[in-house]
Image (cartoon, rainbow, N blue to C red):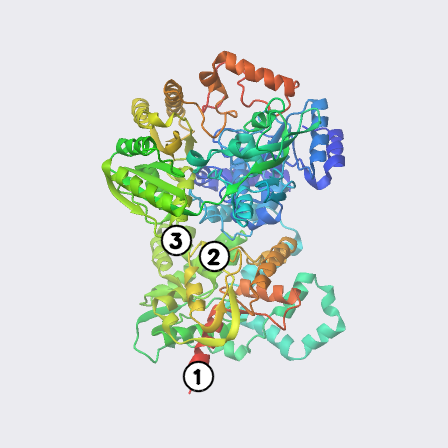
Amino acid sequence: MKTVEKQRIQQQFQEKMDYDELLNCMRCGFCLPSCPTYIESGKDEAHSPRGRIALMKAVVDGEIEPDEDVKRSLDMCLGCRACEPVCPSGVNYGHLLEQARDIIYQNQKQSLPVQAVRKAAFQGLFPHQQRMIGLTGLIGFYQRSGLRTVARKSGMMKLLPESMQLMERVLPDVPTSKSMKQRPRHLRPAVPVKKRVAFFAGCLMDTVFLPTNEATTKLLQYVGCEIVVPEAQACCGALHGHSGEKQQAKSMAKRNIAAFEAAEIDYIITNAGGCGAFLVDYSHLLKDEPEWKDRAEVFSSKIKDISSVLVELGFDKFSLSLQDEIITYQDSCHLKNVQKTFMEPRKLLSSIEGAQYVEMKDAGRCCGSAGIYNLVETEMSMQILDYKMEQTKATKAKTIVTANPGCLLQMKLGIEKEGLSDQMRAVHIVDLLLEAYENANPPA
Amino acid sequence: MLTNNARELLTAIVGKENVETSQASKLVYSFDATPQFQAMPDAIVSPRSASEVAQVVKWCNEQEIPVVPRGSGTNLSAGTTPLQGGIVLLMKHLDKILEIDEENLTVTAQPGVNTLELMEAVEAKGLFYPPDPSSMKISQIGGNINENSGGLRGLKYGVTRDYVLGLEVVLPNGEKIRTGGKLAKDVAGYDLTRLFVGSEGTLGIITEATLKLIPMPETKKTVLALYEDMEAAARTVSKIIASKIIPSTLEFLDQPTVKVVEDFSKIGLPTHAKAVLLIEQDGDAAVVEKDIARILSICEENQAIEVSMAASEAEAEALRTARRSALSALARLKPTTILEDATVPRSEIANMVYAINQIAEKHQVEICTFGHAGDGNLHPTCLTDARDKEEMERVEQAFEEIFTTAVALGGTITGEHGVGAMKAPYLHLKLGEAGVEAMRSIKQAFDPKNIMNPGKMFANENRKRVVVKQ
């Protein structure tokens, strides 16, 4: 890092970091056992929440410079926020991390290729749903045209880093461009309406994972929800926010708030833990913008995860069944640690007849997916995943249930990596619930 | 700063990946859980075996480089802050449970074993290791021994000291010695085991410990008693003990503490009560039944406004966990939280609680109190802001008065957190000058070059401040 960059970063730390929040950490260390990178790094304080907060504070205080090691410590953080619920002092670690990363990434000149990739993804792709559809369409072409067969057979894939090779293998068969474009905007239940909800479709969920979104709206209809799917909605901005692109995240937040506030609804439903948590955080993201702050709070207060609304409307009392098998659940960090939704998925899964729910050890510990973490910090991510797979195998589960697309892909990757794809599967919770519902109530 | 030569030498002993000298690494090991104390070490070294510990320490002794052993850095007396720089010695690789001996009822472990993991490992065999400091999820056995940690069960079961049977210690000259053993009786020479327990890393490095285990109690019951005034709660404590009942836990929390703990734990704690007692008894079912019945009536006789029993072990564990979070939860209220652990004979608990309130009022500082009432070990905690120099002066005065009062009541300046750097200036209050000198000469005998955790236990000057930075 150049001296001038360090100086600029240090100065902005002093101007922008929330010093009261930094002081709120009293360094008791209660966060340490909850931090996956502290554990996997062999108990290195520099990779713990307490250590990272101390580093941020020391940069503000001028005790140290924000050098590469400081950046390394912050980059290594998964952002899983498992340290927050266990913090008796209530430190908002996630907000501190986001602010610190934003300052570093906005002030440090990246290498040209990194700059290009970041710009293409964060500005060129995710904010534009049409382009997401376009790219997914290309993947579909790759998968269906025979190109994939050629690529795999020719050994071309070996040119990619190992994590990318695995990613290519676990990416689900994506929907056709046509189906992605013809999305319904208003759905009514066949039963009397209990709640009116808006569905937050998500950029990745509404393309690569389209069938899961379809399953979600079906379940909502079964429990008596009238659903609107506002067309003007955009990507939630979580990837941007977590990667030091706060400005971009804010503009997406505003777009979403505007898109949803017209609808008269009880809840805004999400089926991706990561998106939901970021939507909940809009009120913090926009806290310094007076004309948006209140609107953001109204928006955030309506966010509800699918499993939570299903339990509220009694889906666990429906008849649900599966073949005799063991199922286990991997928490989505942000669903658990930020949205505090962790009992609901377990309640739903335990209500499926025929299936035996077995809790895995450390189910609440991050799987290592963490947005784009598994692509940029592959080594640590794979180490975390290896631990996760050991716990999964110990349950003897055939099905690993997840609640977020990133976790879902990561668990698929884990299964592939362990060579278990013929005996284990990873699914999104709504897909399994729909399967269990349709199994018990076969469509006429 | 470590010279390149020194770095190479350390690397040759422990391997490259086990010597850290980046400024980020030095910063994250520059503090522990004690507010107001921070100092940069020169390097962080993580030996992989006792013999590597010996080589590192021997070399440091020759070079007169300070050595600060550190577990998880959760202590509350600035015991692991590298005040004079030097090397922070991490025990993270020495993290094995070596043996659980079911015939002699002992466990032998390396210092880096996590306290809770050790407890769970022995409990799986129906055995019980009672010392349970509030940081047990995080702390390491080595740290517990060096600080002689207490906990919620101290009243009935004692503290770490009461469970250490034998130690392997690396002395500053690099010699390895063994003290004690798997023995119920052993009077061969001075009791060096007890000397090293609570020595705060000032005499040597503990590299292995043999700990005493006892059979797991058959059952346990948990009671929560609420009071309208703090002194009625304190009276109940004295009355229970005077009735010849020794509960396994007898914890006291005042209203502000209960409020913040509830804020964090959200388990439905009674925030309307002025004081709360958390009482537990364990043992044979019949005895527990009898004791609990008696405790319930004593609570009621002493104006408890409400007494309830935990319905399940899960509920009881939630209460204990909530209590353990008290100190950190108090940090929600103010930027700086300064905790003390003045301790008095348990018959004096009501007087001490009263005195603390008087002192807080006199100096116009906010003090919340919770603690192990049953063993006289209170944790008056001052909520303040280190940036407010004027208030910090008053905090300083208030704490000095609390110490003096505790000693006057036959108590001590620290019950379980240790002297460290934080209470070094007050050690003489408890021991007298001659007492401090006697200890100093022990230190001198073991560590003539004063490399072991320097700046702890003994104040360099006659008058150093506890909370106000130098």
**Mark 1 chain:** A
Q: Residues within 10 Å of mark 1 (few under 14, many from 20)?
A: few
Q: Position of residue B359 (x, y in %)?
A: 32, 23
Q: Is residue A64 visible?
A: no
Q: Callout 3: helix, strand or loop?
A: helix
Q: Earlier in the sequence, mark 3 or mark 2?
A: 3
Disc 1 with disc 3 on a shared chain: yes
User: Separation of disc 3 and disc 2 at Cα?
Assistant: 16 Å
* Sequence-earlier tag: 1 or 2: 2
Residue at mark 1 to residue at mark 3: CA–CA distance: 43 Å
Name the amino acid, label 2.
His
Provide the secondary structure element on which disc 2 rests: helix
Depth check: B122 or A10 in front? B122
Identify residue for label 2. A334
Picture coordinates of residue A103 (x, y %)? 53, 45
Amino acid under disc 3? Ser
Residue beneath disc 3: A283
Q: Quadrant of residue B255?
A: top left
Give the residue drawn at x 39%, y 41%.
Answer: B323
Vertical relation: A39 (above or below) A201: above
Q: Do the CB atoms of the residues marked 1 and 2 lie less than 8 Å apart?
A: no
Q: Quadrant of the C terminus of chain A?
A: bottom left
Q: Secondary structure at mark 1?
A: loop
Q: Nearer the viewer, residue A168 or A435?
A: A435
User: Tag 3, which chain?
Assistant: A
- Tell me the residue that label 1 is attached to: A442
- Which quarter shows the N terminus of chain A? top right
